[in-house]
Image (cartoon, rainbow, N blue to C red):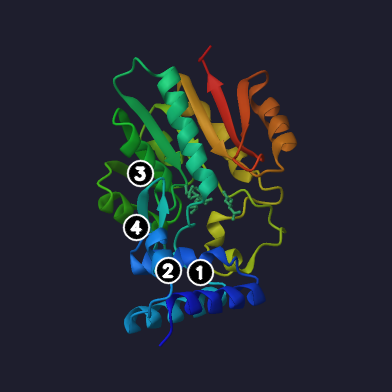
Amino acid sequence: MTTFHRAVLNFETKCEERNVPKETVMAYLVEISQRERYNLYANFDQEMPKELEEEFSNGMQRILNQEPMAHVLGYSWFYGYKMIANPTVLIPRYETEELCANVLARIDELFMDEEKIVCADIGTGSGAIAITLVKEESKISMYATDISGEALETAKQNAEMNEADITFLQGDMVQPIIDANIKLDVLVCNPPYIPEDETMEESVIDYEPHVALFGGQDGLKFYRSVFENCKKVLKEKSFMAFEMGWNQRESMEKLLHEYFGDVNYEIMKDINGKDRMLFVYFGCE
Ligand code: SAM
Ligand code: GLN
């Protein structure tokens, strides 16, 4: 028998020893107890129910072994929507919520008068971006692609769970959009962008699909693929929005120049002040 307080302190200490962020302990407890944080704190000295104590202890053991909390729970939250998380897909990141918010803002500005906005999420993974956009903007008609059949299965389950109407297509980057002869107002893409030889945290490298992480020698392989083919799928007035690595500004600007010459673009920072999003505009003057 233990109190909430003692159990939390115990695992916070263990987290520090194992280099796991100790905030994970309360975050995990909030999820499995289905109680608000303030409610847990208000009852911190009470005995923890036996079943909860067991679940907490088992789950924390896995988290201490570097397994992502989202895998232990089987889900994570993205833009307020619940997403199934499993080893077939990248666990959606906070930075990507910012990408969605900015895409929605630009859609409001640029396509205010349109009745229907055709949008594609390339490399959809869990489906997090596609689901969020279509739930938040009812004028969007959404396509989502991935090379991974397993990822698409998870994305379909997530779309169903969130009642999001999305057409899923399997294939290499924009190729399925070309094949289906779809013309887009908006192309969104969070491609794998980690350079091949980069060292990464254990919890990412051991548990997340490598097909979702690595973007060739310099991390830019998939941007090249989209830049090369985008004119085949974009309407004259359209924009593309990408997530990018915090240290890729210079090489990205070079690449943009190479493919599009003098093009209208912006690189936006994330909440941590790091270069994180690339928006490229065509015919939007
Ligand atoms: N869109 C999701 C998100 O933002 O959380 C997942 C992004 S993850 C960084 C990149 C995704 O691209 C993975 O789901 C991976 O399977 C997919 N992918 C990798 N290579 C691809 C390719 N050649 N064509 C299409 N998708 C690809
Ligand atoms: N941001 C992810 C990470 O750091 C990588 C996402 C990506 O390559 N698009 O693990």
The numbered mark, 1 or 4, whose residue comes first in the sequence reads: 1
Q: Is residue 158 above or below residue 280?
A: below
Which residue corresponds to mark 4? 153
Mark earlier in primary sequence (2, 3): 2
The amino acid pointed to by label 2 is Leu
Which residue occupies the foreground of this view, 17 or 229? 17
CB-based contact (under 8 Å), mark 2 and mark 3: no
The residue positioned 48% from the left and 57% from the top of the image is 91
Q: CA distance from mark 2 to mark 1?
A: 6 Å
Q: Is mark 2 within 8 Å of ligand 2?
A: no
Q: Which residue is mark 3?
A: 131
**C-beta proximity under 8 Å, tags 2 and 1:** yes
Which residue is tagged 2? 29
Is label 2 in a helix, a strand or a loop? helix
Local secondary structure at mark 3: helix
| Disc nearest the viewer among 3 and 1 | 1
Most foreground residue, 188 or 34? 34
Measure the C-alpha gap from mark 4 to mark 2: 29 Å
Q: Quadrant of the N terminus?
A: bottom left
Q: Secondary structure at mark 1?
A: helix
Is residue 174 found left or right of 276 in the rendered image?
left
Amino acid type of the residue that numbered disc 4 sits on in the rendered structure: Glu
Q: Secondary structure at mark 4?
A: helix
Q: Disc 4 or disc 2, which is closer to the eye?
A: 2
Q: Residue at x 52, y 71 (%)?
A: 67
Q: Quadrant of residue 47?
A: bottom left
Can residue 74 be seen at all in this image of the molecule?
A: no
